[in-house]
Image (cartoon, grey):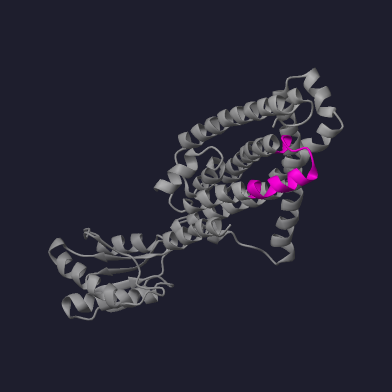
Amino acid sequence: MLAVATIGSLGAVHVVEGSRARAVVIAAPEALPDLRAAEQRLRRVSGTDPGPPPVSFEAPQPDSAGQVRALLGRDDVSAVLSDGQVFHAAKGARDADYLALLAGAASGAQPELRTMSVATRGPGVHSRNAAAFGAVFAMFFLSLLLASQAISMLAEERNNKVIEILAAAVPLEAVFLGKLIGMLGVALLFTLFWGSVAAIAAFGGLGGFSFDAIAPATSLVSFVLLFLGYFMLCFLLLGAVFLGVGAQAGTMREIQMLSLPVTIFQVGMFALASAGAGAPDSTLGVIAAAFPFSSPFAMAGRAAIGVPGWQHVLAFAWQIFWLGVTVTVAARLFRRGVLKSGGGRRA
């Protein structure tokens, strides 16, 4: 559990690091060597809590004022050094001081600090990363609360022989899939009810609530629909695993013994997806999106960050394929290990 918690903390670390605004230096190519050398010296002597901002260098454009305004219009840029002046947004005063030190260390001249008021154009990197991590966490919380109930579903039916009657009437795969769909309906009703209660509390009882800090890259309607689709597939995929594992247990003692590894499996999927939530193109992000049981978590985060539509189409097809594989394997294990052994597992 300590290892899983450590891995899971990578998600928050990626969100914080990926959300840190950067400072931009606009300079001609001949001035870059002195600026880069001065920036390395300052970074070595600066503290690490929180430390200097990431610094990037850009070539000047003919419209220098428009270039500065365009850069500060992004919420991942806090300050800009250009033409001997440091421009910064309302919350970038500390980063502007660092750029002033940088300019003084490189040229010996202290630049003028100026505050520029600009309007950001839609959600930026901070909002997208927060929305991505929030989507992964919300899906993990709902799956932990709802999908794990499937592990104890078949134990009672095994004891009263109901499952044997159902298996004699229809294919066992259909029985498993039908149970998953029924559980999904209950989960959606549960989520709709308590989601409505939370929304009423947020917008009414708490005097209003703003989602500006966690705005997804896509429209809110598209994000909600994608999140709902991935939640359904996440519930069905994990529910199929838990249903298959729980079908092997015949007593409450065995169910309790199986609950811990099931919970660790869920936390592991959350840890993998959250670690790559802020960086979908990183190695962890690609692995999380490709692994079938963490794919719904990771793709919900990608929906918040904004990725091409073909990735969502491919992800839905991939997850549906693995849902069929998981249901088939779980049904066959139950048939061979339980039904063909007189109600008990093989030694």
The magenta region covers 246-263
Q: Residue at x 28, y 73 (%)?
A: 43
Left or right: 11 as drawn, with respect to 195 = left
Residue 254 lies within the magenta run: yes
Residue 341: quarter of image: top right
Residue situated in front as seen by the camera: 269 or 299 = 269
Q: Residue at x 46, y 50 (%)?
A: 276
Left or right: 202 as drawn, with respect to 109 = right
Residue 9 lies within the magenta run: no
Q: Residue at x 66, y 30 (%)?
A: 330
Residue situated in front as seen by the camera: 50 or 163 = 163
Left or right: 240 as drawn, with respect to 310 = right
Q: Residue 84 location, x and y as percent?
A: 22, 74
The mark total stands at: 0
> Does the magenta stretch mainly form a helix, a strand or a loop?
helix
Q: Residue 340 location, x and y as percent?
A: 74, 23
Residue 115: quarter of image: bottom left
Q: Tell me the quadrant of the picture where the N terminus can be found.
A: bottom right
Vertical arrangement, residue 298 with respect to residue 4, above or below: above
